[in-house]
Amino acid sequence: MSLSLYYQWKHFDEDEYRPEKPRKFGVTEMRSPQYNLLNQNLLQDIFESMGPFVDGLKFSGGSHSLMPKSFIKEVINKAHQHDVYVSTGEWAEHLIRNGPSAFKEYVEDCKQVGFDTIELNVGSLEIPEETLLRYVRLIKDVGLKAKPQFAVKVNKSDIPTGRDRAFGAYIPPVPQSTEFIEDVDLLIRRAERCLEAGADMIMIDADDVCQHADSIRADIIAKVIGRLGLEKTMFEASNARTSEWFVRQYGSKVNLFVDHSQVMDLECLRGRNLDKEEIISDMVRRAQNE
């Protein structure tokens, strides 16, 4: 269904342009509702009510590894009927332990089942950079999209508290949050090489970057977007407040990965002045008239 049917009462300024699917920016990828029972009726309800606002479906947590292939194919076919691409989520890293040929077999299997995108969790893979680039090329060679996922680890003890203290006052040390600290410039360089190798999108994990709205690392996000570009980056938004921060800072063109329960709220944010109740009532009215 055309987005113009939903937005016909809304006048968009030039910088608020909201393209129809398939979109290259303003992409909303939805986490599969694996914590509920993932069934076709639930997905059908989501796609029929919010299909124009959902660009991608991600099988999070390797949930697809526990499902029969016949069921996965049915879910993927249903998503494709609504122009929704389907991503594997972070699961490839669990298969590499089976040997050097396991990843190639995994990619071919994903292609056969019908997946559109294979996500590579760079932190969990723990492989040399050249091997990562080879995996990206292998995914592209079979006609699938590659999405490397990067995470930034920040030692919170190095972040100033911002509290005023008398000069010379004793400040108790803050326990180090992690032993491994990611160099953001190194992360961006590796992401740039992945894009050069053919990667379609770079996913940035929420941990230590945008997990909570009151502790968002705007400096890291700005550097990533400044170097990689808004169209080539996607950020995980853990909650509605985080999504709102991204849309306020970067507009409707920012690509976000959200829980399936946040899709409607996010689309309302992308439309800025759109009223959620008005959208829902209009959708119900149109469904009744069809």
Image (spheres, helix red, strand yellow):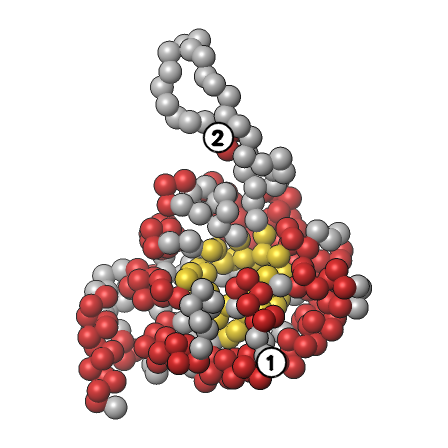
| Quadrant of res 253 | bottom left
State the image coordinates of residue 271 (x, y, percent, origin top left): 29, 64
**Relative to 118, 246 lies left or right:** left
Name which residue lies at 46% across and 73% down: 38
Answer few, some or many: residues within 10 Å of disc 2's Cα (few below 14, many 20 plus, some between 14 and 19). few
Answer few, some or many: residues within 10 Å of disc 1's Cα (few below 14, many 20 plus, some between 14 and 19). some
Pointer 1 residue: 69
Q: From what the image shows, is residue 148 above or below residue 165?
A: below
| Quadrant of res 71 | bottom right
What amino acid does circle 1 point to? Lys
Is residue 193 in view?
A: no
- Marks 1 and 2: which is nearer the front? 1
Q: From what the image shows, is residue 260 above or below residue 114?
A: above
Q: Quadrant of the N terminus?
A: bottom left
Name which residue lies at 70% across and 76% down: 108
What amino acid does circle 2 point to? Ile
Q: From what the image shows, is residue 123 above or below residue 60?
A: above
Under circle 1, the secondary element is: helix
Pointer 2 residue: 159
Distance (Cα) linking label 1 and label 2: 47 Å
**Relative to 278, 107 lies left or right:** right
